[in-house]
Image (cartoon, rainbow, N blue to C red):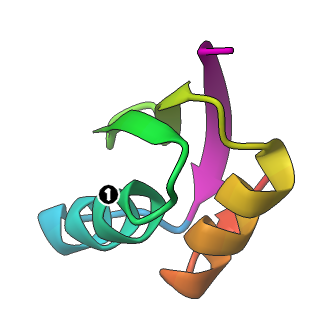
Amino acid sequence: MTTTATYSVSGMSCDHCVQAITSEVGKLADVESVSVDLASKVVTVVGAADAASVAAAIDEAGFDVD
C-alpha cells in the first residue's frame, strides 16, 4: 500500500544535506519518491517503506528525525 509520510529532520542546512538524505532514503526498496524541503526541514516519502526503515536511512545520511 502506497502512503505519503513526512518526517521532521534536524541538522539540514545545504544542498549536500538534501542529496545525502535523498540518496539514502531512495535506496529503500519500498520508496517511490523522496522530497526534501530544506526551508521547513521536512522530508516527504511516498511509498510503502515503514517509518523505522526511513528513520534508519536518514540516520545513515547523518541526520536525526525529530
Residue 52: give x, y in percent of width and height. 84, 57
Residue sitting nearer the eye, 29 or 9 = 29
Q: Secondary structure at mark 1?
A: helix
How many callouts does the rendering have? 1
Residue sitting nearer the eye, 42 or 30 = 30
Residue at image mark 1: 22
Hey, which quadrant is residue 49 in on the image? top right
Indicate the quadrant containing the N terminus: top left, top right, bottom left or bottom right. Answer: top right
Question: Residue, x 63% and y 27% (percent of image)?
Answer: 6
Q: Is residue 53 magenta?
A: no
Residue 31: give x, y in percent of width and height. 47, 41
Residue 56: give x, y in percent of width and height. 72, 72
Question: Residue, x 15% and y 62% (percent of image)?
Answer: 15
Q: Is residue 3 magenta?
A: yes
Badge 1 amino acid:
Thr
**Can you say whether 59 is above or below 6 in the image?**
below
Q: Main secondary structure of the magenta part?
A: strand
Residue sitting nearer the eye, 26 or 21 = 26
Hey, which quadrant is residue 12 in on the image? bottom left
Q: Is residue 23 left or right of residue 19?
A: right
Residue sitting nearer the eye, 28 or 11 = 28
Question: Residue, x 61% and y 59% (percent of image)?
Answer: 10
Badge 1: how crowded within 10 Å, few (<14), some, or many (20+)?
Answer: many
Residue 57: give x, y in percent of width and height. 60, 70
Residue extent of the magenta highlight: 1-10
Q: Is residue 41 left or right of residue 51?
A: left
